[in-house]
């Protein structure tokens, strides 16, 4: 039975298929033969396939510090200008965009927040082949490239680039580190201005997408500028206080008791017991004063276990804290802090004009205004201003967020300043170590400072008498045994002192008029986010 099936002739359909396949194979063989004959008859016709740009472009092998090209000198994009017209330079930058058009390719190179146009064209005299042009056009966006190019003055400004008076004419193009072809967001989309222009593009990258892909998001010109301004705030803070005789100290972030009291503290496992993440360097600043450092400051992480999902709260932020002994009145310290902040504002306006302008291109806002010396109001004055505006606040109540914002608008309208100091807060709303007002038992020697109607600093004269400090701690329900070392430091003699803590991210957010603190925290932490 099997043999008879094997020896059967092919079915009609199978025969047709075989004939079709044979015909196809014959055609392919004929095509190959013609191609071979053509090549043999005119060998010179194949010369156009030779790549005249070989060795001038491609992918660089992984840089492992072998010592190659150490004599190569690179130029920063921001330093290019018409004064370099005709000169050749090496540039290392990211390829932001590229567009191939015939025998040309136009690209934009970006270095930090500076951009410049790159042109590469097929040119036999310059040994630039179509293969090289095609290679350049196919480089994935955001790849890092090394380019050797001639600087060429442009007939008219290149509007899309920050360096607009010149462009680069490529001679060598090497990919140093390729980006993946499909990106989770485009930097040019993330950098689009946030305006209400009905004619403008409505493409928006939402906040979660930005934060989930923060490394890409941080490449936008505005973000590059924001975090340079933030670095400037820290530097100006340090420089101002150092010039005035302050000493920078570094305080523990793992502590035995909640530094501010209350429940807004992170508990961590600490070997066979528990400890807490510091809500403030407060206690240690005071102990440094008791140790005769007189004037101290610190810059470091602060942790707050507040389940607040607002535009201005983070669970971890950078605190700019200072503490200072005084002779007779805590206003000696208050004046120092106020002057520190006005000097920071002035320093930013004078030293970071370009960065402020870059941020404003994406996030338009009115320039920050301040007085020197700064405006100082007392809490009863603020209550009265709010009352006249139709808002009632009790004399022992704290200000709510809407109250603070309204007060900021009222102060701006009346005094033409975005920055002011509010003194003499109610004692009931301040921490246990706050010195009461000697003339009013319901008030305290404490203060807050505001920018655009939002608090950026809280401070006070601290209690430096150990018995009185113990009494106030018990009043706040704090376990005295856990702050025994803190209280004990005042039994050794301690000068009167005051200070405050500034939220760095808030200062930058409000100075620039941004709408969310996550824009000024490089990798923000809030109740819903602990990555990346």
Image (cartoon, grey):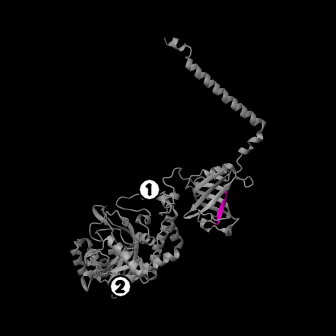
Left-right relation of 260 to 175 = left
Q: Secondary structure at mark 2?
A: helix
- Residue 288 in percent (x, y) is at 35, 78
Mark 2 is surrounded, within 10 Å at the Cα level, by few (under 14), some (14 to 19) or many (20 or more) other residues, namely some
Mark 1 is surrounded, within 10 Å at the Cα level, by few (under 14), some (14 to 19) or many (20 or more) other residues, namely few
Residue at the bottom extreme of this rendering = 328
Residue 132 got which mark? Answer: none
Q: Residue at 73% of width from left, 45% of height from top?
A: 48
Q: Quadrant of residue 452?
A: bottom left
Q: Quadrant of residue 438?
A: bottom left
Q: Give the residue at mark 1.
A: 209
Left-right relation of 31 to 65 = right
Whole-angstrom CA distance, mark 1 to mark 2, is 46 Å
Q: Is residue 281 visible?
A: no
First reached walking from the N terminus: tag 1 or tag 2 = 1
Q: In this rendered view, identify the residue nearer to me: 304 or 478.
A: 304
Residue 212, above or below 245: above
Residue 289, above or below 265: below
Quarter of the image that includes the C terminus: bottom left
Residue 6, above or below 110: above
Q: Give the residue at mark 2.
A: 331
Q: Residue at 34% of width from left, 62% of height from top?
A: 309
Query: Which span is picked out in magenta?
Result: 165-171
Is 238 included in the stretch rendered in magenta? Answer: no
Q: Secondary structure at mark 1?
A: helix
How many marks do you count on the picture?
2
- Residue 258 in percent (x, y) is at 29, 69
């Amino acid at each position: 039975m099997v043999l008879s099936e094997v020896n059967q002739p092919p079915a009609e359909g199978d025969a047709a298929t075989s004939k079709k396949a044979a015909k196809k194979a014959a055609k392919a063989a004929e095509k190959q033969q013609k191609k071979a004959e053509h090549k043999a008859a005119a060998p010179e016709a194949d010369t156009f396939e030779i790549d005249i740009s070989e060795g001038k472009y491609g992918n660089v092998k992984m840089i492992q510090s072998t010592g190659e090209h150490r004599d190569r000198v690179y130029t920063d994009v921001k330093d290019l200008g018409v004064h370099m017209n005709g000169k050749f330079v090496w540039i290392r930058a990211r390829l932001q965009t590229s567009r191939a058009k015939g025998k040309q390719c136009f690209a934009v190179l970006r270095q930090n927040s500076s951009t410049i146009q790159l042109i590469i064209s097929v040119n036999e005299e310059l040994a630039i082949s179509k293969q090289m042009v095609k290679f350049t056009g196919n480089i994935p966006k955001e790849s890092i490239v090394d380019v050797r190019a001639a600087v060429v003055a442009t007939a008219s400004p290149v509007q899309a680039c920050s360096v607009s008076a010149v462009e680069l004419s490529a001679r060598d193009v090497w990919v140093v580190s390729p980006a993946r072809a499909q990106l989770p967001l485009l930097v040019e989309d993330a950098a689009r201005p946030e305006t209400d222009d009905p004619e403008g593009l409505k493409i928006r990258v939402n906040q979660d997408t930005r934060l989930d892909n923060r490394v890409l998001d941080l490449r936008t010109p505005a973000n590059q500028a924001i975090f340079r301004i933030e670095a400037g705030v820290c530097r100006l803070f340090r420089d101002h206080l150092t010039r005035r005789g302050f000493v920078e100290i570094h305080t523990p972030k793992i502590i035995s008791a909640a530094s501010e009291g209350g429940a807004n503290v992170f508990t961590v496992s600490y070997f066979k017991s528990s400890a807490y993440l510091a809500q403030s360097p407060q206690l240690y600043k005071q102990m440094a004063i008791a140790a005769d450092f007189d004037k101290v400051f610190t810059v470091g992480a602060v942790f707050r276990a507040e389940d607040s999902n607002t535009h201005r709260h983070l669970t971890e932020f950078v605190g700019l804290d200072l503490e200072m002994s005084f002779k007779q009145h805590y206003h000696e310290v208050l004046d120092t802090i106020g002057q520190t902040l006005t000097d920071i504002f002035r320093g930013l306006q004078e030293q970071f004009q370009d960065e402020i302008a870059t941020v404003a291109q994406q996030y338009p806002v009115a320039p920050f205004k301040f007085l020197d010396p700064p405006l100082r109001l007392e809490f009863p004055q603020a209550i009265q201003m709010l009352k006249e505006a139709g808002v009632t606040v009790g004399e022992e109540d704290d200000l709510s967020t809407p109250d603070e914002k309204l007060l900021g608008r009222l102060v701006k309208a009346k005094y033409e300043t975005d920055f002011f100091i509010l003194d003499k807060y109610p004692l009931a709303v301040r921490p246990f170590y706050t010195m009461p007002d000697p003339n009013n038992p319901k008030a305290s020697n404490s203060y807050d400072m505001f920018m655009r109607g939002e608090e950026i600093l809280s401070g006070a004269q601290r209690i430096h008498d150990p018995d009185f400090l113990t009494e106030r701690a018990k009043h706040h329900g704090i376990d005295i045994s856990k702050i025994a070392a803190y209280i004990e430091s005042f039994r050794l003699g301690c000068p009167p002192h005051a200070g405050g803590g500034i939220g760095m991210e808030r200062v930058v957010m409000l100075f620039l008029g941004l709408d969310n603190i996550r824009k000024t925290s490089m990798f923000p932490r809030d109740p819903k986010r602990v990555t990346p």
